[in-house]
Image: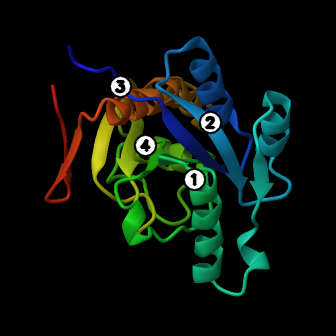
Amino acid sequence: MSRGPRRLRLGVLVSGTGRTLENFAALARDGSLHGEVVLVISSSKQAYALERAARLGLPAFALPPGSFPSEAAFAAEVYRRLEAARVDLALLAGFLARLPIAERWRGRVMNIHPALLPGFGGKGFFGLRVHEAVRAAGVKVSGCTVHFADDEYDHGPIILQRTVPVFFEDSAEDIAHRVFEQEEVAYPEAVNLYAAERLRLSDGRVQVLP
């Protein structure tokens, strides 16, 4: 008899409102996410996500990058906190600070981006800026991308993507709303694939195993 997916210990890294964090917490409670959030790290003391974490009873810490002498020192403290909490998988959820991926964490840090990478990504492409760029380009399809993070912004092996239509009359806010609905599905799906050991990294690409 085959064993089921393991229940992961998840660390969620945030900078903003924490809507994705709340989605993970809700899915963990109802059993549809094969994991539980055991740690929240924010790059900002003002992030509303910290209030959400407190309301959800989740351990949370603010680690502003500017309070560290270097990016390396900041990253070292992030990994120290993750490892102290015995986190299996780190999830970047609107985390705006650059986090160099330590060798021992490669393939264990995921990110979600509100566009179809490799388009409309990179430094400075976050929030409504992404959707404004999508609208200005006149593309007819957008969506979201879940990928393993590497040392570049919005870069790394793609795990899965989900698409949405873009209509001529759409505002950036319209596109954002439609994309976020798919993010709420795609990110948990990627976590569950990881928990089921169905993701294989090879030559910079991800194979989803049956």
Give the label, 3 or 2, closer to the camera: 3
Q: Quadrant of residue 66?
A: bottom right
Of residues 100 and 185, the one nearer the viewer is 100
Give the label, 2 or 1, closer to the camera: 2
Q: Quadrant of residue 99?
A: bottom right
Task: Inspect the image, locate mark 1, and give the three-letter code of the amino acid beneath it.
Answer: Phe
**Residue 5 visible in this rendered orientation of the protein:** yes
Mark 3–mark 1 Cα distance, whole angstroms, equals: 32 Å
**Residue placed farthest to the bottom in the image?**
69
Give the label, 3 or 4, closer to the camera: 3
Residue that label 3 marks: 5
Tell me if residue 68 comes above or below residue 101 in the rendering: below
Label 4 secondary element: loop
Mark 2–mark 1 Cα distance, whole angstroms, equals: 24 Å
Residue drawn 49% across and 31% down?
A: 183
Q: Position of residue 10 (x, y in %)?
A: 55, 41
Position of 88 with respect to 51 (left or right) is left
**Residue 166 visible in this rendered orientation of the protein:** no
Mark 1–mark 4 Cα distance, whole angstroms, equals: 10 Å
Give the label, 4 or 2, closer to the camera: 2
Categorize mark 4 by other alpha carbons within 10 Å: few (<14), some (14-19), many (20+). many
Q: Which label's residue is closer to the chain start, 3 or 4?
A: 3
Q: Are dots 3 and 4 in contact, CB under 8 Å? A: no
Q: Position of residue 170 (x, y in %)?
A: 54, 28
Tell me if residue 150 comes above or below residue 47 in the rendering: below
Label 2 secondary element: strand
Residue that label 2 marks: 37
Residue that label 4 marks: 115
Q: Are dots 3 and 2 in contact, CB under 8 Å? A: no
Task: Inspect the image, locate mark 4, and give the three-letter code of the amino acid beneath it.
Answer: Ala
